[in-house]
Amino acid sequence: MTARIIDGNALSAEVRGQLAERAAALKTKGITPCLAVILVGEDPASAVYVRNKVAACEKAGMRSLRDVYAPDVDPAVVFARIAELNADPTVHGILVQLPLPKHFDSEAVLEAISPEKDVDGFHAENVGALMQGNPRFIPCTPYGVMKMLESANVPLKGAEVVIVGRSNIVGKPMAMLLLAQSCTVTICHSQSRDLAFHTKRADILVAAVGRAKMITGDMIKPGATVIDVGINRTPEGKLCGDVDFETAKEVAGAITPVPGGVGPMTITMLLANTLEAAERTQMRCAK
Ligand code: NDP
């Protein structure tokens, strides 16, 4: 069997087209959705992510602000900028690119962002709302995965889901979203015993680890849907996921590629959250 490809580029283009239309409609009411991105340091991967986010905003007819700080910046400077952006009514979304340098308290930075503008969905208030099943902003990567599952018509109710990885930005929110859709969810991590025992049971397998090609075809249930969140580089410098695509595609029923899978959808859902934040402002103004 060769798996059906769940194409993140194609779905992104479709969703971004819809978002651009909504952004244009909002502009006629005098509001241009605006995302502010803060980057601290010179990590090349982070710089690329920020550049892609800013470019995507502009392409969708949204405004973006970018603040870049030296790696040794005094955290007080960044906190002051966040406070300024929180108070600026023309800014609807604020994102601080992670990871931050070691002298920063990352949690305190995320908590400093107004929950109404926390388009990454990482503020404790927004994490709590997601846990309660009433999310204000859904973290972008798991949000993108949910859109991909929906577009590929993957049945969720009662499905056995195995998520490999328990980070706050991917694994845990992913589990909450799938649980809310009545999946039976197992979360695996670095201390899980016999990983393959779990992965082989999964109707839907989500890999979010950060280890190149660690999920091989023999760890996958025939016909399963495989979502590869990982972004890694091979020794030759090529991008690859956590799933060994070549062996996995012979067993899975559907699979997301890397690149061109979850990555583009993550940025798309960031745009969606920013637009939603701007639309909420407009609704408040209209009242
Ligand atoms: P983290 O490093 O925060 O988390 C990795 C998780 O994998 C941890 O829970 C860890 O377990 C678990 N893990 C590590 N080794 C093993 C193992 N051998 N077996 C099972 N579990 C293991 O990573 P992130 O969640 O931030 O990111 C995961 C991957 O997704 C990365 O490649 C990242 O680049 C990518 N990513 C992609 C995005 C996209 O847009 N496509 C967005 C965000 C991330 P433990 O908790 O026990 O340490």
Image: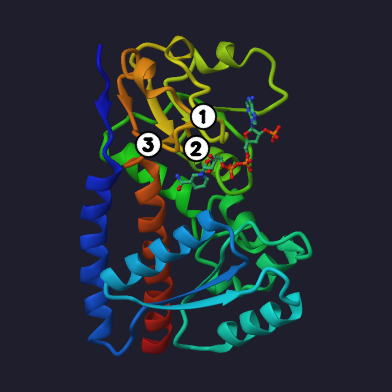
Q: Is residue 23 left or right of residue 131?
A: left
Q: Which mark is residue 212?
A: 1
Give the residue drawn at x 50%, y 14%: 201
The residue at label 3 has a CB less than 8 Å from ligand 1? yes
- Which color scheme is applied? rainbow
> Is residue 246 visible in this depiction of the protein?
yes
> Disc 3 residue type?
Val
Within 10 Å of disc 1 (Cα), the crowding (few <14, some 14-19, many 20+) is: some
> Which residue has dot 2 on it?
232
Do the residues bearing badges 1 and 2 touch, measured as CB atoms within 8 Å? Answer: yes
Contact between labelled residues 1 and 3, with CB atoms less than 8 Å apart: no
Give the label, 3 or 2, closer to the camera. 2
Disc 2 residue lies near ligand 1 with CB under 8 A? yes
Q: Give whichever of discs 1 and 2 has the lower sequence position.
A: 1
Circle nearer the N terminus (3, 2) = 2
Mark 1, secondary structure of its residue = loop
Label number found at residue 258: 3
How far apart in space, not on screen, are marks 3 and 2 (Cα)?
A: 9 Å
Q: Position of residue 82 (x, y in %)?
A: 62, 79
**If the picture is divided into quarters, which one holds ligand 1?**
top right
Q: Residue furthest front?
A: 236
Place residue 256 in its image quadrant: top left
